[in-house]
Structures are given as C-alpha cells and as structure tokens.
C-alpha cells in the first residue's frame, strides 16, 4: 500500500492535464498496470535508459514555470509525511537557479541573507552607497477602544449648507427642505447614575401612601427634602419653616370723575350740563334725534382683584365604596401586622381567654387550679379594658387643639379669598340690648366695620369671611327682635305720634379687594353730616349714600 501511494504522489506533480495528446509519451518501462495507470492519467514517464541529469533537464524543459512551485511543494510534503524520495526526481528539487527556466528562477528566494549597510550618519545604504528610503511602519493599535477612536476621528460629517446660491448650484431645488439637525448624528446618551437611597425612599413613600394616604406621604417627602437640604448646608436649622415670598397685587389707579359722563355727551348739544340748568325747552337742550328705541349697554368694568382659581373637587364616594375601601385598608394593615409577627419584630398577642370560652381554650388545664385561672382571666380582661380607655384618652384632643379646630371650622374658609362686605340699614338702634348684640357678635365672628347711629336711621357695615358674614346676617335679619320696646319707655305717648315699625334690612352685599376698617366700633352721631364724615374718612362714603337712598318696598 505504501509503495502504491508513493508512486501516486510521484505521478501527480508531473501530470500535464492541460497539454494535448501529442506531448504525452507512453512509458516503456514498468509493469503493465503502471503503464495503464499512466496512460489513463496522462502522466509522462522518463525512459529507463535516459540518465538522471538528462531526464531532469528534459523534464524541467517540459514543466511550465508556474507549475514548478507546485511540484516542489508536493515533493516536500511527501518527504514530511515519511515517504521514500525517488532518486529520479531528487535533482529537480536541488537544481540551481541558473538551470531553471527564467520564470521559475524569478520565483526563487535569494540564497544569501540581506546585508545591513550604514553610513557615518546611521542611514541605511545599498551596495552602491545610495541612501535607502525606508518608510517607517505605522503603529497600529489592536485595542478595540483605540480602533473605534481612530474610526471616529477619521469619520467626517458633511454639514448641510445653510444658504445655497441657486446661480452657483444649478441642481439646487428650493422645494426640498434640508433639516441639518436630522442629518447630523445625535449625541450618544451618557450614563445616568441613580443616587444612593433613591429606591428605598420611593418604597417608603409608597408604603406611607398605602397606610395613611396621599397627604401623609407628601408631608413625609417634604420633610425628607428639608432634611437633605439641611445636611447639604449645615448652617441652616432644619426645624425652621421656609416662608415663601408674598405676592402683593397692585391696585389699579382709580379713574378721575369726568365733568360730563360719556353716555350723556352725544345727547347734549353743547356737551355740558350747564345747558340743562337753563330754563329753555327740552328740544333746545337735548338732541332728540339721538334718542332711539335701541339700548346701549355700558362698558364692562374690570373687577378690582383677579378671581381665585377653583379648588379641586374631592372625589365623592358612595357608602358602599367607603365601606369597601375601609375593609381593604384594615385587611392590608392586619396582613402587615401578621408579617411583622412572623418575622419576630413584634410580640404576638396573648390568647384572649374569657369566662365563657374557658373550657374551649384551655381544656384540661382549666380543671387543675380553677380559682387561680379565674383570677388570671379577670386580670387580663381588666388590662384589656384599661388599654382601650388609654387609647381613647391618647386620641382625645387637648383643650387648645379643640379650640383651634373650632376656630378653623368657623373662620377658615378656603373657598373665599376676598373680603365680603354687608351694609344694613336700621330705623332705630337706640335699644341697649340690641346694640350689645350687634357689637359683641361682630367681635366674636372676627368682623371689622362700624355701626353709625344718627337721628333718622342707623347704618351697620361689617367686613369678613363668608361664614362669619352668613352667621352675622342671620343675627341681624332673624334673631334680633327689632320691634321690642324699652321697659322704662314712657307708656303715656301720644297716639298721634305713631312711628313706623323698627326693622333691619340688607342694603348691599358684595366683595372687595381688602377691608377698609381695622376693628368694629360704634359711633353715636348727633347730625347726619357727622355720620357721613365717619364713612368718608374710611374711604367708603358711598356706603352711607346707599343706605340713605335705599327704599324698602315692604315699608
């Protein structure tokens, strides 16, 4: 088997499949099987009577220069694999470059090693003394980071031209919009590291929401932010409450009173009220052609203050939904308590033993010492009852807290931010009992204003919140009996001097930007001019005019 395989390895390099049949020479030596194999494969054999040198020269002359290297590699491979080298083809490998064809000699490597020659300056020179220019090898990095950096530096982005001249660029189409921001490569997102303790804080806030609600969670979050700010700035006291900047709305300047109102200007012929005072006829004073059947609406006046934004309406739940939420909240609280007991954070509750379930809970232990067991059961029941009372006392508000809660319910109304004013007209306020009620109720409801008593009638003006104004209105219009007479009043009054019944009416009620009085006080004025002066000094003289000109239809 080795002999046949060696013969095949010798024959394969000498195959000349591309040549015609005229170049093939049949072998004269060897066995019939070898001749048959050689003729079938088209292999050229050397006659045995030809000397080796002549046969090798003749063989080299027949082999193409391009196939010489293939022949040599095949022989070297056979030698490495341990096959016997045939003396017939040995001279082919050991030929000198001069004996090979010119193409084959060019493929051979130089026999001598290159010699390094340097001049006096340390430069490399050749055999003739000429300086050899050797390009320095570029230092290429094999790290992926450096390779990506070199690619990024070599990559150039052609930015779009902002302004293109159509005359210089004949291919410019103004209809094609170029967005340079889309053509440019966007910035690569950098790492965004999470601050330490962020997830634990979020988990704590979610837990507070599930336990106590949204308000408690917001308060806890604000407290944490305040503590973090205090840690960042150690000089700040964390217990201080930060006060926001007060926003002061500027009042609009009041317009001056014109000589002639704008709605009367088109009707007057001379544009002055002096013509009306003359004794001339109406046709001479007024332009009758301007009076038509159409109604001209006055110019709308802007309010003195901006209206308050509407408060968010709370979600109203039905009784069934409230019970369902309460059940879910209690179940979640009980599960959390059981989990803490399971983890050993809190002590498990003692078994609730009563006289009714004594035998069911304790069983045989109840018969050993019944007297001692009964005392223990009664002591545990007394402790539970006392714990219940203590919890109720702990939840009970202190007197100061109850007073604060009552004042908050009475006077703190978040729906109204402006000040509400009510003007009342009373025929007679001389009764001391009624005067005391008017004064003390205004002070208790924290109202400001005044009560002016004059000869003809009295005027009461109060300013405050909506709830206080509503309670004071019930006092003035319902509770006080204005028709009651004094006990020491002279019963021998003349029947001819019948006075109209004493009563109180609401003249006007509305809202203003800010109150005009500091407190509530009562003025006794002898004349109407003195009463009018009290209101004009406060800047609300129109309140007196409203009350003086008011006519009640029921009187």
Image (spheres, grey):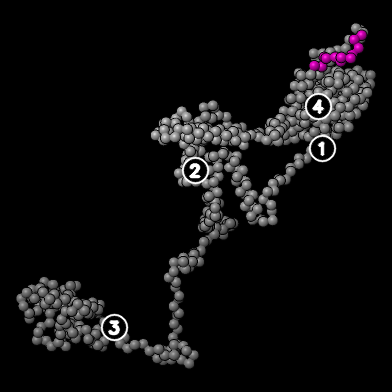
391 or 296: which is nearer to us? 391
Of tags 2 and 1, the one toward the viewer is 2
The stretch in magenta equals: 481-492
Of tags 2 and 4, the one toward the viewer is 2
- The residue labelled by disc 1 is 253
Q: Quick check: is 483 in the magenta stretch?
A: yes
Secondary structure, mark 4, is helix
User: With respect to residue 306, does 48 lie above or below?
Assistant: below
Secondary structure, mark 1, is loop
- Image coordinates of residue 471 in percent, x first then y, are 74, 25
- Image coordinates of residue 476 in percent, x first then y, are 78, 21
Res 111 seen here: yes
Q: Look at the image and tell me in which quarter the N terminus lies.
A: bottom left
Badge 3: residue crowd in 10 Å (few <14, some 14–19, many ≥20): few
- The residue labelled by disc 4 is 440
Residue 347 is marked as: 2
Residue at horizontal 64 percent and vertical 49 percent from the top: 226
Residue at horizontal 94 percent and vertical 21 percent from the top: 278
Q: Confirm or deny contact between disc 2 and disc 1 (CB under 8 A).
A: no
- Image coordinates of residue 457 in percent, x first then y, are 87, 20
- Image coordinates of residue 318 in percent, x first then y, are 54, 27
Q: Main secondary structure of the magenta part?
A: loop
Badge 4: residue crowd in 10 Å (few <14, some 14–19, many ≥20): few
Q: Quick check: is 354 in the magenta stretch?
A: no
Counting residues from the N terminus, which is met first, the one under dot 2 or under dot 1? 1
- The residue labelled by disc 3 is 108
**Residue at mark 3 to residue at mark 4: CA–CA distance:** 128 Å
**Residue at mark 2 to residue at mark 3: CA–CA distance:** 96 Å
Of tags 1 and 4, the one toward the viewer is 4
Badge 1: residue crowd in 10 Å (few <14, some 14–19, many ≥20): few
Counting residues from the N terminus, which is met first, the one under dot 1 or under dot 4? 1
Residue at horizontal 46 percent and vertical 28 percent from the top: 356
């Amino acid at each position: 088997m080795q002999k046949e395989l060696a013969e095949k390895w010798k024959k394969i390099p000498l195959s000349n499949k591309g040549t015609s049949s005229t170049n093939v020479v049949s072998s004269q030596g060897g066995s019939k099987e070898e001749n048959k194999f050689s003729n079938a494969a088209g292999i050229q054999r050397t006659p045995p009577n030809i000397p080796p040198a002549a046969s090798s020269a003749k063989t080299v002359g027949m082999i193409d220069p391009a196939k010489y290297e293939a022949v040599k590699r095949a022989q070297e491979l056979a030698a490495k694999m341990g096959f016997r080298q045939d003396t017939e083809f040995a001279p082919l490998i050991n030929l000198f470059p001069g004996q090979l064809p010119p193409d084959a000699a060019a493929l051979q490597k130089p026999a001598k090693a290159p010699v390094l020659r340097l001049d006096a300056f340390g430069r490399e020179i050749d055999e003739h003394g000429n300086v050899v220019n050797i390009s320095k090898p570029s230092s290429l990095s094999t790290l992926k980071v450096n390779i990506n950096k070199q690619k990024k530096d070599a990559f150039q982005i052609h930015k779009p031209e902002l302004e293109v001249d159509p005359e210089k660029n004949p291919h410019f189409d103004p209809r094609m919009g170029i967005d340079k921001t889309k053509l440019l490569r966007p910035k690569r997102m950098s790492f965004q590291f999470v601050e330490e303790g962020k997830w634990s804080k979020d988990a704590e806030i979610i837990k507070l929401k599930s336990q106590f609600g949204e308000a408690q969670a917001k308060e806890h979050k604000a407290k944490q932010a305040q503590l973090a700010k205090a840690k960042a700035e150690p000089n700040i006291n964390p217990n201080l409450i930060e006060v926001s900047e007060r926003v002061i709305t500027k009042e609009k300047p009041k317009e001056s009173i014109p000589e002639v109102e704008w709605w009367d200007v088109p009707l007057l012929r001379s544009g002055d009220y002096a013509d009306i005072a003359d004794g001339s006829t109406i046709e001479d004073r007024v332009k009758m052609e301007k009076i038509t059947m159409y109604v001209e609406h006055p110019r709308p006046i802007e309010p003195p203050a901006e209206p308050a934004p509407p408060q968010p309406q709370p979600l109203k739940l039905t009784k069934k939904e409230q019970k369902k939420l309460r059940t879910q909240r209690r179940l979640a609280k009980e599960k959390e308590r059981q989990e803490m007991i399971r983890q050993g954070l809190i002590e498990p509750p003692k078994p609730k033993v009563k006289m009714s379930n004594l035998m069911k809970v304790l069983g045989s232990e109840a018969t050993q010492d019944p007297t001692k067991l009964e005392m223990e059961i009664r002591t545990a029941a007394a402790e539970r009852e006392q714990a219940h009372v203590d919890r109720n006392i702990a939840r009970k508000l202190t007197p100061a807290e109850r007073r604060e809660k009552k004042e908050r319910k009475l006077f703190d109304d978040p729906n109204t931010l402006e000040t509400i004013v009510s003007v009342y007209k009373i025929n007679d306020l001389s009764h001391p009992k009624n005067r005391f009620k008017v004064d003390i109720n205004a002070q208790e409801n924290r109202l400001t204003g005044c009560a002016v008593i004059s000869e003809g009638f009295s005027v009461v003006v109060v300013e405050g919140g909506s709830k206080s104004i509503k309670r004071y209105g019930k006092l003035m219009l319902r509770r006080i009996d204005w028709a009651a007479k004094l006990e020491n009043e002279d019963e021998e009054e003349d029947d001819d001097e019948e006075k109209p019944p004493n009563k109180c009416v609401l003249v006007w009620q509305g809202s203003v930007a800010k109150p005009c009085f500091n407190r509530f006080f009562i003025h006794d004025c002898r004349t109407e001019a003195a009463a009018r002066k009290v209101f004009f000094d406060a800047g609300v003289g129109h309140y007196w005019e409203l009350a003086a000109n008011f006519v009640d239809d029921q009187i």
